Image (spheres, coloured by chain):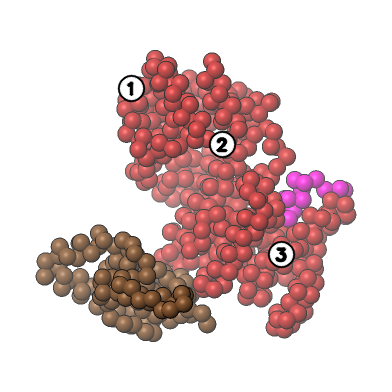
Chain colours: A brown, B red
Amino acid sequence: MKYVLMFVDTEEFTKEVEAMSPAELEAAYGRVNQWFIDNADRISARTGKLQGAATATTVRLDGPEPVTTDGPFIEGKEVISGVIEIDVADLDEALRMVKTWPACPVIEIRPVES
Amino acid sequence: MTDLATADELARVVREHAGRLAASLMSLLGDFSAAEDLVQDAVESALRRWPEEGIPDRPDGWLFTVARRRGLDVLRRQENYRTKLAQLQWPVRPEPDDRLRLIFTCCHPALAREAQIALTLRVVCGLTTAQIAAAFVVPETTVAQRITRAKRKIAHAGIPYRIPRDDELGERLSEVLTVIYLLFNEGYLSSTAEQAHSRDLVDDAEWLTALLAGLLPNEPEVTGLLVLIRLHRARVAARFTADGQIVLLQDQDRTRWDHAAIAGATALLMRTARRHHSPGPYQLQAAIAACHCEATTWGETDWEQILVLYNMLLRLQPNAVTRLHRSVAVRYVEGVEPALAELEELEGALGKYALFHATRAELLRAAGRPSEAHDADQQAIVFTANPAQLNLLHDRLSS
């Protein structure tokens, strides 16, 4: 079954990352890379990490004309910072995988329509 | 056919067979939602017809036949289900494990708590949606929506129908025990003498725990919860006056407790503790209940032992509710003032919890501060909806 994992950064987590020394940051990236290596055969699609919400642009098509605005579609303290697609047996396997994720503190798991 | 069935007998017989039928249809069809619907239909037919026709000699065969016939009828479009159902012969012999899989699926952590409770009652205990709605005093449509949404999530989100792996069993079992404990609590708190005719959720909770203990004999916490429930039930006759008023533990007529049930439950707890040497939160709460049950009078309560047990419990679950309960033991071992001091620290966490204010009121009264006690009782009234508790609090305010 395919699921999309949405990685979510919180303000607190962003501050923690900003406060890291170069060595700590390198170690943190090392843990994330290792996670991707460990789970390589379950990951069916991935992009890189997304740039910050401040770089987002939102287009709304539900009015008479398309409206383009600066910022994410929903303003909040928690923002999506990455998206990958996984292919696993069931939700339990997805949950096991997510529980070992070494970085941002929130992940949403969404099944993909088959 | 037996004689006309009482509501209690009906509930017992349905509960004994509904989960088994759900499990065998589930393994046959591989579709949780379809299997569950068929069982619910069969249960509803039984509840309509058995009161008049009597409980059949083989209730399981009866339920099976109705579910199968209904399945052949409603699953017209799903040819593969029809073929499977058509081939099915009675008796089917389900593995005992099958109901365990049902329980773990109903209590999957990806489902909302209310949905876990409603699903478990419907699928494993064979309650109808109407019975669940009545027990929780919510509209039937609310329960029906919870069930529908949960079943859709099980299917669409890929929640597996399986017993968790060994390395996940502990965590998942604790989720199941939480669901049963909440069910028990709901039944325990809402039970009054007036409601004796409504569904006894405490009975369902005990039955579920006993089932689980049979299926997972090496899990001491399951036994701990079973003993806890049995010890509470053993005292139920003394908990209410004839007109439904709560009688506090200290005022209960202890000769009305079921002392044989207490002895049996306590012995089971001791055997489990000796065999496993791993006291968890449920075993400890059961041990605390056992201390109360073994005291022949309120004055003989072994508070020092109870405080030791609460200290162990607090290490395992360091939360405000445990500290609140522990404060009562602190009062009788160390005195009223240390107990009050302990409570003051919990105001932030438990300020909206009736039992916090009620406990504080008692301590304040014991400390000779009646006007503050009065205020605390009034706070307790604000945060409780339970009629028997309200009566007790109003009595205290007017005396």
Q: Mark 1 points at which residue?
A: B337
Is label 1 on the same chain as label 2? yes
Most foreground residue, B37 or B90: B37
In this rendering, the answer to whether B4 lies above or below B23 is above
Mark 1, Cα crowd under 10 Å, few <14 / some 14-19 / many 20+, is some
Query: Which amino acid lies under the numbered mark 2 shown in the image of this protein?
Result: Ala
Residue at screen point 71% across, 62% down: B40
Report the front residue among B217 and B304.
B304
* Above or below: residue B238 compared with residue B125: above
Q: Which quadrant of the structure image shows residue B43?
A: bottom right
> What's the distance in space between the residues labelled 2 and 3, CA to CA?
34 Å
Name the mark on residue B385.
2
Residue receiving disc 3: B39
Q: What percent of the width, then of the height, locates residue B216? A: 53, 58
Tell me which label, 3 or 1, sits earlier in the chain.
Answer: 3
Q: Quadrant of residue B243?
A: top right
> What amino acid is at disc 3?
Val
Residue A4 location, quadrant: bottom left
Residue range corresponding to the magenta coloring: B1-16
Overall secondary structure of the magenta stretch?
helix
Per the image, label 2 sits on a secondary structure element best described as loop
The residue depicted at 54 percent of the width and 68 percent of the height is B153
Give the x, y percent position of residue B308: 37, 34
Question: Quick check: is B196 in the magenta stretch?
Answer: no
Residue at image location 17% in from the left, 65% down from the top: A18
Residue B63 position within the rendered picture, expressed as x and y whole percent measured from the top left = 77, 63
